[in-house]
Amino acid sequence: MDKYLKIVFCFVCIISINAHADFSSAVKDYNEKKFPKAMQEFQRTAALGHKQSQLNIGVMYFRGEGVAKNIVDAYAWTVLSAEDGLADSIRTKGIISAKMNEQQKTDADIKLKELMSIYSNEKLKLTLYPKHSKEKAKFSYASFKAMPQPPRSAISEQFSKYELEYDIDPQGYIHNYTLLEAEGVTDVDKLVNYLASLKKYPQRLEGQPIWAYNVKYGHIHAGKGRTKQLVEEVNEEMREGFTPEIDWSNAENLYQHAVNISDSLISEKMQQHKTLLLISAARMGHPKAQTFTALNIIYGNHFEQDRQKALAWLLSAASSKDNSSLYLTASLLYDGKLIDANKRKAIEFLQQAAEQQHVKSKVKLAWILATEKEAEFFNPPKALQLINEAYSNYLDRVTAYETLAAAQASNEQFDDAINTQQSALNFAKEIDANIDGAQARLKSYQQHQVWRQ
């Protein structure tokens, strides 16, 4: 875990602790004397109500680090950070106050009111912080009801472990699958064919198709009947992880504790503890905690549903430039089913992830640019460039073929599009996937028509 230094204004006293994501980046930059960048990052987490970040901003204003010295701003930010009774803030507030004249104190009161109107706990409860609810979401990320077993010849008999990430389209079919982790895989081609076979199982909730993004599925296999024992050992490690005292200054630690607490078979008190851990990590700028918080708000899972608060957390996560967060936020913004649609912002986020070589974002962006009905988002040359960059290494071959065909057709390369789409159709038939959409697109290309969604 990366180390960082928490700024505590006790003259020049510094204390070392751990953190993650934006706050840790800010402190790392501060320690390297990159003060303007550190200030910018502290401001990002301060806007989420993170009190230590607010205190650090106050200290930097007082010292003139990255900004001009300003005792008025220093005092206002420090008082704001003391809202939760943070001992360092209270002590620092007294030190700064002793150095102020009456006019500066008057000006600081005005500045404080301005900050409180935006960043106080009371204000953030209205705009950002979700309300806890006893309700559990009816929707849960899809799990396979008839999961086929991976071919034994593709994985080690002694031990194998892999984690799969995928999306579910509006018809309930799996696509855009990627392999996040693979250990003990002996035949990648056979494993890829196995992953492709998952398209045969449409996901449904109460008889209706469901859709989702970035769903994760993990698989563990151990030889000599040790799989069950191995899973029990992992679960025991998770349980033991709650015995040490939680480090509330460490966003990654808080997030891991939160996600390891199951949503089932736990008390209401434990569930409240989980949501507190999650929100605390999110306030420190942890992008995965922020997206997890947003999804819980969207689906009403132990939080009251609120589209605007969910969007605020998603946008904050995307601002971290984390590829997974950019992709998820873009997907939700583009389809507009669970939060208000914003296609322009969605494409902007996908472009950022694509520039960071996130293959899944390249493929999705290529599809959008090749098929979008709105003229301002239709960009055939860019679509073809993106899918050509991602095509050869993309595990989901049906999606890869279909995206390439759409890009070719949008560039009026219809003969190529027909051949590529036929390959997509043939592959879909081999794995017994739904082929209605693939057939419709093939017919469109045969008629020299661009597929526009």
Image (cartoon, rainbow, N blue to C red):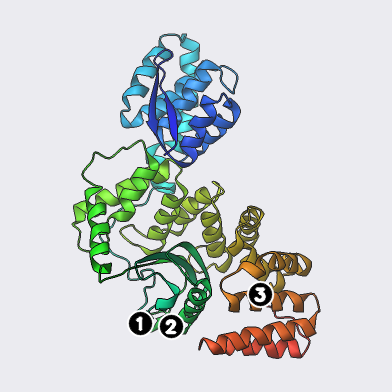
Of mark 3 and mark 1, the one earlier in the sequence is 1
Q: Are marks 1 and 2 in contact (CB under 8 Å)?
A: yes
Q: Secondary structure at mark 2?
A: loop
Query: Which residue does the numbered mark 2 point to in the structure image?
Result: 201
Query: Which residue does the numbered mark 1 point to in the structure image?
Result: 146
Looking at the image, residue 77 lies above or below residue 182: above
Tell me where residue 357 appears, x and y as whole percent.
63, 56
The front one of 327 and 130 is 327
Crowding at dot 2, Cα within 10 Å, few <14 / some 14-19 / many 20+, comes out as some
Q: Residue at x 40, y 21 (%)?
A: 8
Looking at the image, residue 367 lies above or below residue 354: below
| Label at residue 403 | 3
Q: Give the distance between the C-alpha atoms of the residues marked 3 and 1, in whole angstroms.
A: 28 Å
Q: Are marks 3 and 1 in contact (CB under 8 Å)?
A: no
Amino acid type, mark 3: Thr
Amino acid type, mark 1: Ala
Q: Residue at x 64, y 57 (%)?
A: 354
Q: Secondary structure at mark 1?
A: loop
Mark 3 or mark 1, whichever is nearer to me: 1
Residue 108 left/right relative to 219: right
Q: Is residue 1 visible?
A: yes
